[in-house]
Amino acid sequence: QVQLVESGGGLVQAGDSLRLSCTASGRTFSIYAMGWFRQAPGKEREFVTAISASGGSTDYAASVKSRFTISRDNAKNTVYLQMNSLKPEDTALYYCAARNHPFGTGRVDLYDYWGQGTQVTVSS
């Protein structure tokens, strides 16, 4: 069992930056690929980015590529999401997710564990 706890959300202005963190319980964090997803009110949960278990491979949604960066520190059981040049359309509840697989994916249904989410609100 893996428990995920996100932090770092908040209210910012357009153009600002935020860094989200997701810390996992357990001693096997390094075998899990990790992903970040987001869900805005009235919309489906959507893929943001993912990182492989080793940290050597990453993938991004087109809407955030070049603005967001995912990274992980397996020694700290933590995955990060650095978000720069934030836009109002980035406003959502951000979730991290763990997949018991070497590589991440954009498919919601292929992740095994989910956090509770952290709210990011970007004002114009």
Image (cartoon, rainbow, N blue to C red):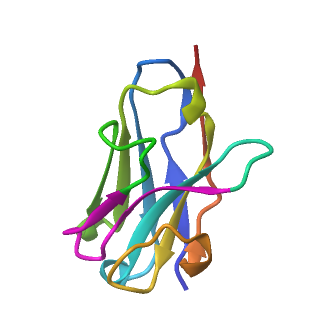
Q: Nearer the viewer, residue 35 or 47?
A: 47
Q: Residue at x 45, y 69 (%)?
A: 24
Q: Residue at x 44, y 86 (%)?
A: 100
Residue 56 is a magenta residue: yes
- The residue segment tinted magenta is 45-59
The location of residue 80, given as percent across then percent down, is: 36, 52
- The single residue placed furthest to the front in the displayed view is 62
The location of residue 66, given as percent across then percent down, is: 29, 39
Across the whole image, how many numbered discs are drawn on residues? 0
- The single residue placed furthest to the left in the displayed view is 56
Q: Is residue 93 left or right of residue 99?
A: right
Q: Residue at x 30, y 73 (%)?
A: 52
- In which image quadrant can residue 65 be found? top left
Q: Is residue 49 left or right of residue 117?
A: left
Residue 42 is a magenta residue: no
Q: Is residue 19 left or right of residue 96?
A: left
The location of residue 2, given as percent across then percent down, is: 52, 79
Q: Nearer the viewer, residue 32 or 38?
A: 38
Q: Is residue 62 above or below residue 26?
A: above
Q: Is residue 112 visible?
A: no
- In which image quadrant can residue 121 be found? top right
Placement of the N terminus among the 4 image quadrants: bottom right
Q: Is residue 89 above or below residue 31?
A: above
Placement of the C terminus among the 4 image quadrants: top right
Q: Nearer the viewer, residue 95 or 74?
A: 95
- The single residue placed furthest to the top in the displayed view is 124
Q: Is residue 96 visible?
A: yes
Q: Residue at x 52, y 54 (%)?
A: 6
